């Protein structure tokens, strides 16, 4: 009986250690990043004007994005006029998103530097957080506002076709639309939560 209890105690200790091992290091390696809150891919995406998932409330609620509308121009039967309008919206969005993405990078770098220096006080921390939050909000506005503009250019049939072509009219977990990162798509659509 003593051997059984000792064995159970050893198993419990090993399980606890294994659980702790997996949960104590979720940010391992992040300390080596240039900006701890942004990966190299995040920075590249922000500098390219990529959507960064900021427009999901629009995209997944029936407000098509200009980049994807242009990718699907033939399938949506866009007129030349529609293509020109959406192209103008996209190009303006991309230019603004690059500038706002850089502002977010600068703000996150300043916040990170404040902590690295080790001499932050509460007012400085508030100022740095507010600057980063404002930069993120401004970037998000750039992306979301262009979804509003794009919706005004499309007719209802095109909007419905867009939803089907992007995979929103079906079970989003059944297939990943072309051009999407499969892991991010599954995470954003809650596919792995069941």
Image (cartoon, rainbow, N blue to C red):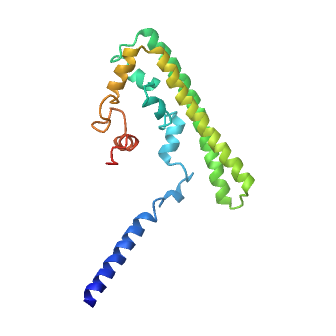
Q: Is residue 40 left or right of residue 99?
A: left
Instruction: Decide which of 141, 29 is in the foreground and name it.
Output: 141
**From what the image shows, is residue 119 above or below residue 94?**
below
Measured from the top left, where is residue 59 in percent x and y?
44, 30
- Tell me which residue sits at (34%, 20%) in the image: 161
Q: Is residue 117 left or right of residue 78?
A: right
Measured from the top left, where is residue 172 in percent x and y?
32, 35
Measured from the top left, where is residue 8 in percent x and y?
29, 80
- Tell me which residue sits at (50%, 41%) in the image: 44
Measured from the top left, where is residue 47 in percent x and y?
54, 37
- Tell me which residue sits at (34%, 76%) in the image: 12
Q: Is residue 110 left or right of residue 95?
A: right
**From what the image shows, is residue 97 above or below residue 25?**
above
Total numbered labels placed on residues in the image? 0
**Quadrant position of the N terminus in the picture:** bottom left
Task: Tell me which corner region of the image, top left, top right, bottom left or bottom right, holds residue 98.
Answer: top right
Instruction: Decide which of 42, 146 is in the foreground and name it.
Output: 146
- Tell me which residue sits at (67%, 44%) in the image: 130
Residue reaching furthest to the front: 1
**From what the image shows, is residue 120 above or below residue 191?**
below
């Amino acid at each position: 009986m003593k051997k059984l209890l000792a064995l159970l105690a050893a198993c419990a200790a090993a399980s606890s250690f294994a659980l702790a091992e997996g949960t104590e290091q979720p940010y391992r390696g992040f300390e080596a990043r240039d900006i701890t809150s942004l990966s190299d891919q995040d920075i590249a995406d922000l500098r390219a004007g990529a959507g960064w998932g900021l427009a999901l409330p629009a995209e997944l609620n029936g407000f098509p994005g200009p980049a994807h509308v242009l990718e699907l121009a033939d399938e949506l039967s866009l007129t030349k006029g529609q293509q020109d309008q959406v192209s103008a919206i996209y190009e303006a969005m991309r230019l603004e998103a690059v500038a706002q993405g850089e502002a977010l990078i600068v703000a996150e770098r300043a916040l990170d530097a404040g902590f690295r220096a080790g001499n932050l006080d509460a007012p400085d921390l508030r100022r740095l957080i507010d600057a980063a939050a404002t930069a993120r909000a401004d970037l998000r506005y750039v992306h979301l506002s262009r979804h509003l503009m794009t919706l005004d250019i499309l007719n209802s049939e095109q909007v419905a076709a867009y939803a089907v072509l992007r995979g929103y009219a079906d079970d989003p977990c059944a297939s990943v639309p072309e051009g999407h990162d499969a892991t991010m798509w599954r995470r954003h659509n809650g596919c792995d939560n069941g």
